[in-house]
Image (cartoon, coloured by chain):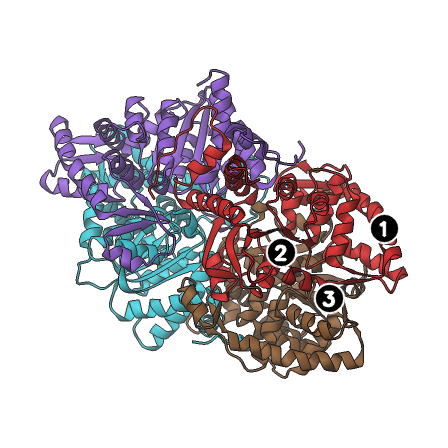
Chain colours: A cyan, B purple, C brown, D red
Amino acid sequence: MQVEDFRWKKGMNAGELGKAMGSIGFQGAELGRATENFVKMKKSGAKIFLTFTSNMATSGLRGFFAQLVELGMADFIVTTVGGIEEDIIKALGEKFSLGKFHPDDIQLHEQGVNRVGNIYIRNESYAKFEEFIQPLLHKMYEKKKQWSGTELMDELGKTVKDKNSFMHQAAKKKVPVFCPGITDGALGFQLFMFQQEHKDFIVDIVKDFETITFATSHDDKKGIIALGGGISKHFAIFTTLLNGGMDYAVYMTTSRETSGSASGATTDEGKSWGKVKDDSDAVTVVGDVTITFPIAMIPALEQLSKEKVI
Amino acid sequence: MQVEDFRWKKGMNAGELGKAMGSIGFQGAELGRATENFVKMKKSGAKIFLTFTSNMATSGLRGFFAQLVELGMADFIVTTVGGIEEDIIKALGEKFSLGKFHPDDIQLHEQGVNRVGNIYIRNESYAKFEEFIQPLLHKMYEKKKQWSGTELMDELGKTVKDKNSFMHQAAKKKVPVFCPGITDGALGFQLFMFQQEHKDFIVDIVKDFETITFATSHDDKKGIIALGGGISKHFAIFTTLLNGGMDYAVYMTTSRETSGSASGATTDEGKSWGKVKDDSDAVTVVGDVTITFPIAMIPALEQLSKEKVI
Amino acid sequence: MQVEDFRWKKGMNAGELGKAMGSIGFQGAELGRATENFVKMKKSGAKIFLTFTSNMATSGLRGFFAQLVELGMADFIVTTVGGIEEDIIKALGEKFSLGKFHPDDIQLHEQGVNRVGNIYIRNESYAKFEEFIQPLLHKMYEKKKQWSGTELMDELGKTVKDKNSFMHQAAKKKVPVFCPGITDGALGFQLFMFQQEHKDFIVDIVKDFETITFATSHDDKKGIIALGGGISKHFAIFTTLLNGGMDYAVYMTTSRETSGSASGATTDEGKSWGKVKDDSDAVTVVGDVTITFPIAMIPALEQLSKEKVI
Amino acid sequence: MQVEDFRWKKGMNAGELGKAMGSIGFQGAELGRATENFVKMKKSGAKIFLTFTSNMATSGLRGFFAQLVELGMADFIVTTVGGIEEDIIKALGEKFSLGKFHPDDIQLHEQGVNRVGNIYIRNESYAKFEEFIQPLLHKMYEKKKQWSGTELMDELGKTVKDKNSFMHQAAKKKVPVFCPGITDGALGFQLFMFQQEHKDFIVDIVKDFETITFATSHDDKKGIIALGGGISKHFAIFTTLLNGGMDYAVYMTTSRETSGSASGATTDEGKSWGKVKDDSDAVTVVGDVTITFPIAMIPALEQLSKEKVI
């Protein structure tokens, strides 16, 4: 395949742009490979694991994740608790604002504003989450005492109505949401508070391990779209390893492989473990996912839609 | 403070080198600030949270973590499950080897070798872990049915004898080890296997939230040494936020703040949340922790040792 | 401004996508600011400096640079010699191919293939450059003995006919091309070879300093689009500093500010020097330029075209 | 080679620390390989090219570079003009101060302070350079009209007396200093000013290409220590390619290979070009050079000194 000179065409569509990037070279070319991989993954009938870090749900990608669930582009979601909280918070009508990466953080703190990169969230938004969650936990407790993490996620998703909420769409489409570090955020605090009064209320996270592991079989084709690193990415690839590893893998991250972290680990490293199959279609794209993911996914959606796959 | 020209002195000691780096500028200067912060943190009597990602325990830093626990430089450890597994595996006598970042990963896979950056681990090493853990879970089950994560960690640590094992040293020194994503690795699989036969065996991770939150009070001075990002870092800073935030904070990471991730979040971002106090001593050092952490910590240890603090 | 949930619309155009990214947050938001900056820069009548590193001309961005010159979006180009060579090589009909980041480099070397990231260039392509340049230098020598770098660039550009060549378009549109490190590549070798036989042939690079410095005045509005770092970026901002600094600045780079390099230096650092005016519109976008630049520039082109500015 | 658990030993020396890092893994291991490479390079009698970006001379590494020249660890220096200016400025008695990465840059500008990462330089320091350079150019002009870049560097170095100045030490030890982008900074402005009055004053940079190319032969062993990227790194490896490429290569950088830049290009990429020989000893260490370079070089100096090589 050759490097092709890129030119803007007036009114060109986003799918065309994404495709053209595939011939520019460097990360543009890897992005083009990601697009192809998304198409193949879906057309092969693979079960798709969509994993992302909390900050991505804080960003406007949240609506895109919801849409992908709607479109059947994700069969399982794995994320961290912050992302779940912020999805719910927005579903409750709260808005986050765009700010700066280097503001006066002490002043923000005095104003009751919390910063996530260049996104600002008011204390009030978290208070809303608190008001929402306690009654829900009560209702759940009345039903039964012991819940798996995935069941808890499902309850959360069912309770909100917002087409841009991935939790809502996941509940609607029966897409399990896994959150392997379920206490690492405000939800953890709320669960702890609730447990103070209800000692027999248990969240059984070992159960989730079983659920995700048996969600696919050795015979299923499996694909992963891992956005960012951390526990979301690792949990999906580790548990799938037990079922023979991924047939399709797209990792999109800003982390480097040079420090040996799971976050920066490439699909090649995954092959040494069998997390990614030796003969898989696999690609690693380096860059900020708020930019790389839409531009890589849109041409795939255009093509799949044209071919009536989605 | 001025930039000072650096010169090698024959036989100079490591503490001297670390101190001198503090006047070179760029990350060297931030590293110098980290050293000062470590000293102040310890001398103030702060409760120290040492957090690190799994890959660091895979590396030879593991022995240094163990030593820091011995020396009283860590009151709490937060890490991910991979790091715990690999600490135990080494305590069982297994060795990891140094390899390359870009080997033939398919060949490695065929040889039963798993790659973590440029470190290679044989399948046999994980098999050893498996042999070790099942009898232990049986013994634990005989004692009681419901365990918190921290209690499980303590049992693991007590069972091995290796001065370079941070799990061993933590158990010995009664330093709690928190692992907020306890199922995200081989341990998760072992717990699941065990639970198949012992349905009433429960790991209660909400309990850990309580333990870490009540481990320190508003009145305690608190410090964090966060190596790498992810759930280990976030869990320590989030739970401490509930107690008024950190008085001392050193973040050492390769992640960038530009993507809004918790891993790349600076101590400044932490201030907007109150995770790091407005008037705290706080510093972020960018670089590979296998290099930056020893060189920043050693001058602190030399000074604290000279002043008979450790 | 608020974070907006992103959703794909079937057939959405690239301009729409770019605009939507501006409300996603993180680098997407910075990219949106870059788009606005491009529009303002052009509409204000600013003189625009487009700077890029050699590897970008190696990539398919070359055609886009050529198009931007055609459209009047660049009044001056600053780049390194490798980019000029590769632009000419492609104008001579050579093709580069898309490869891998981690091939067997020794094998590539044996096959006469040179790698630039994931782009492969055959030795023959450089041989073509050699055949092209020597006759040109002879013709130039017949005209005069002492040339400025910019004059040499102009001769190079005039000699090729390729609409996707930025050197061709620059010569056609009388856009000066500056190359402050003119000997750092094959051209340096060719100049040296020629000078062996023609001792009085001189390339006067101090003259270029004069040319770029007097190309704009204190009174002119000035803008910079700096893609990547290094000498191209620094030369444009340093020389413009002498004329009061930039009114508009967009830096797009993968470099970090943490190491104090000019490549990673942000527009904020530029303000301390007066390279970027205190009240300028300035933005730094972190990411691979093969992806970020088209997606940021296209919405600007769509808008400017609609408003008949270009 | 095995991963070894790292432990601090009270009073351990810096050489010991560096060696121990080599067994930690990740970049620590690559750093250990760099140390071995430095030793082999020197003991083989290779001609050593030391290249660095301007910001490193701004930092306190400047004194270390000077010392390495004194010790015979560098036969050629390649750098950018900013580094030369700042070395001279410090040799004239000016001091730079340590500041912050995110200060109020507009305020700094108003105070006449220029920022390079976390290093601050006062306007007065540059004024000193100006006062110094014009009389020197006059003296040079009286000697002859046409100078190569290297000759100009030599004159600069001879004029200052400061053991921590690499320019001073290079002049003293007859180590040529190459600056392929000689006009990209204050020196460019001073040359331009001088040329206004002295039209026949010429700096012939093509001559430097000849000098560096003939400085070593195919038969010489050649080594490179490339700190940071950009034109300094590329000029040394490109010109040496013409003589058969490097036998030893250590690249230390914060740049990533993923964007295809010369700055991030690894020693592997260098092999595809023949810039680095197929059977060379070559290593790339990722990290901030203010930290990685001293800690990698010191154990090499200790060993070479013990073996009486230096």
Position of A167 with respect to C144 (left or right) is: left
The chain under label 3 reads C
User: Is residue B249 something that shows in the picture?
Assistant: no
Closer to the camera in the image, D138 or A148: D138
Mark 1 lies on residue? D134
Instruction: Name the residue located 58 percent from the left edge and 82 percent from the top edge.
Output: C92
Position of B119 with respect to C75 (left or right) is: left
Examine the rendered structure and indicate whether residue D69 appears above or below residue A7: above
Closer to the camera in the image, D245 or B96: D245
Q: Secondary structure at mark 3?
A: strand
Mark 2–mark 3 Cα distance, whole angstroms, equals 30 Å
Tag nearer the camera, 1 or 3: 1
User: Is residue C105 something that shows in the picture?
Assistant: yes
Residue C107 rendering spot, x and y as whole percentages: 41, 67
The chain under label 2 reads D
Amino acid type at mark 1: Gln
Instruction: Name the residue located 63 percent from the left edge and 43 percent from the top edge.
Output: D65
Q: Secondary structure at mark 2?
A: helix
Amino acid type at mark 2: Ser
Mark 2 lies on residue? D232
Mark 3 lies on residue? C47
The residue furthest top is B308
Q: Are marks 1 and 3 in contact (CB under 8 Å)?
A: no
Q: Secondary structure at mark 1?
A: helix
Image quadrant for the C terminus of chain C?
Answer: bottom right
Amino acid type at mark 3: Lys
Mark 1–mark 2 Cα distance, whole angstroms, equals 26 Å
Q: Are marks 2 and 3 in contact (CB under 8 Å)?
A: no
Badge 3 local density, few (<14 within 10 Å), some, or many (20+)?
Answer: many
Closer to the camera in the image, A272 or B153: A272
Examine the rendered structure and indicate whether residue C125 appears above or below residue C287: below
Same chain? Circles 1 and 2? yes
